[in-house]
Amino acid sequence: MKNIFKLFFSLTLSLNLFSCSNSLILENNLDKNFEIFSKNNIPTVRDTDPNFLTFFSKTYNSGDPSIAKNFEENPDKQIIKLINETKKTLDICIYHIDSETITDAIIDAHRRKVKVRIVIDSDTNQTESVKRIINEGIPIVEDNRNSLMHNKFLISDNETVWTGSFNFTDNASWKHCDNTIKIKNKYLAKNFIAEFEEMFIYKKFGRQSIQNMRNRIVRIGNKYVKTFFAPEDDVPGAIINEIMKANKEIKFLSYSFTHSKISEAILKKKKEGLKVSGIFEYTGSNTLYSEYKNLLNEGVTLYRYKSIDSSKSFMHHKVIIIDNKTVITGSFNFTQNASNDNDENILIISSSETAERYNQEFERVKSGCELTILN
C-alpha cells in the first residue's frame, strides 16, 4: 500500500511538471549558470569549534560526481571518519542507505566489537547495503507502516550527534545538495538516544511516539541548540515561532514545501517589509499543493534548482536562515506529512557563525538556479 501511494505520488509529480507555469525564467541558460556555479567564487567561511561542524555535499546541477568524490569535507567522507572513530556504541536512524563505502564502515565497526543498532524505513530494506548489514548479524528495526521513518541521524559513543538532510546513499553523496551537522555534546546526544530507543526498543513510530525530550535547549560554546522531533513535538509551530521573531531577512532552501501555515508566516514577514528569498527544488514545485506559486504571487524572490541533464540531481535541503543568526535544519520537509505522520527531526541553532555557513551554501546553490518572476 505504501509503495502504491508513492508510485501514485510520483506519477502526479511527473504530470504536473508538464503543466503550464505562470512564471518567466529570467536566467534560462543553465549551461552558463553551471559554469558560474562550478567556479564557486563564494568566500569560504569555516567552523571554528571542533565540537560543532557543518558539512555540505559538493554537488552541482550537472550531476557530475567527480567534484564531490574528490572533496575531503563531503558528508560521505566525514560520516565514514566518524564511524571509524567510534569506540563503543553506534546508533543509526536512517531513511535510506545504499552507499557501499558507508556500509563498509558500519560493518567494520561491528567487527571491531562496536555495539551497532540501526533503524530504517521499511521501504528501503531491499538495498544491497541492508542485506549485507543483516548478514553480518547487525540488528535492524523497520517501521513497517505506510508513513515514513524519514530521520537521518547517528549517535556515536553516546556523545556525538550527526544529523541533517543527508541519506547514506551515493546520490546524496555525489548528486544531491544536502547538509549535515556533527555535534559533540552528551546532553544533545541524550535527546537523540531517547528518540532512537523509542523506535529501536519500543517499536513506537509516527503517531505512536511520545514526547520524551531530555534537554530541549543545549548550549554548546557560544551556540544554543533546540531539538524537536515530529510528530510528537509541534515542529511547524516551532518553525513558525522562529519565523515570527525575524526582523530583517528570511532565506530558505526547500526540497518540498506544501505547508500552508509556514508559508503564511513567511508572507506575513514579507508584508512587514522583511527581505525574503527562497530556493525550491524544481521537481514538484509546479504541483497543486506546492507553496511555490503562492509565495511567487506575493512577490517573494524565488529560485528553482533543476538538473541540466538526466542526472536527477536534486536540491534536497530543508533549511531556513533567519536574520543571519538562526538556522533551522534537519530531515523535516515543510509538509503536512512530515508534521503529522513521519518520524522527523529538526535543530534550531542560534549562531551567527553557523548562519554564515548556511548563507554560503544558499549562495552556492542559488548561483546554479533559475530566477523566476510573474508574467
Image: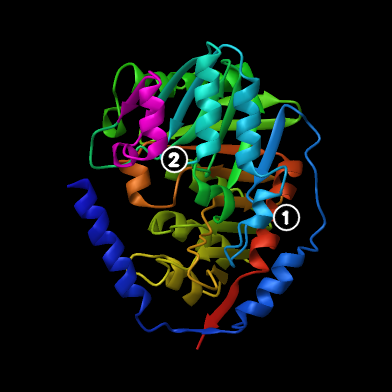
As displayed, is residue 85 above or below residue 367? above
In this rendering, would 368 be left or right of 14? right
Give yes or no for residue 141 being in the magenta stretch.
yes
Kind of residue at disc 1:
Gln
How far apart, in angstroms, are the residues tagged by discs 2 and 1?
A: 25 Å
Residue 335: % across, % down? 38, 52
Mark 2 element type: helix
The residue that mark 1 highlights is 360
Residue 199 magenta-highlighted: no
Tag 1: Cα neighbours inside 10 Å, few (<14), some, or many (≥20)? some
Which residue is located at x 54 percent, y 52 percent?
317
Q: Nearer the viewer, residue 12 or 133?
A: 133
Residue 289's disc is none
Confirm whether residue 247 shows in the render. Answer: no
Image height check: is 132 above or below 63?
above
Identify the mark nearer the N-term, 2 or 1.
2
Task: Point out the stretch of residues depicted in magenta.
Answer: 119-142
In terms of depth relative to the viewer, which is nearer, 53 or 225? 53
Residue that badge 2 annotates: 235
Quarter where residue 139 is shown:
top left
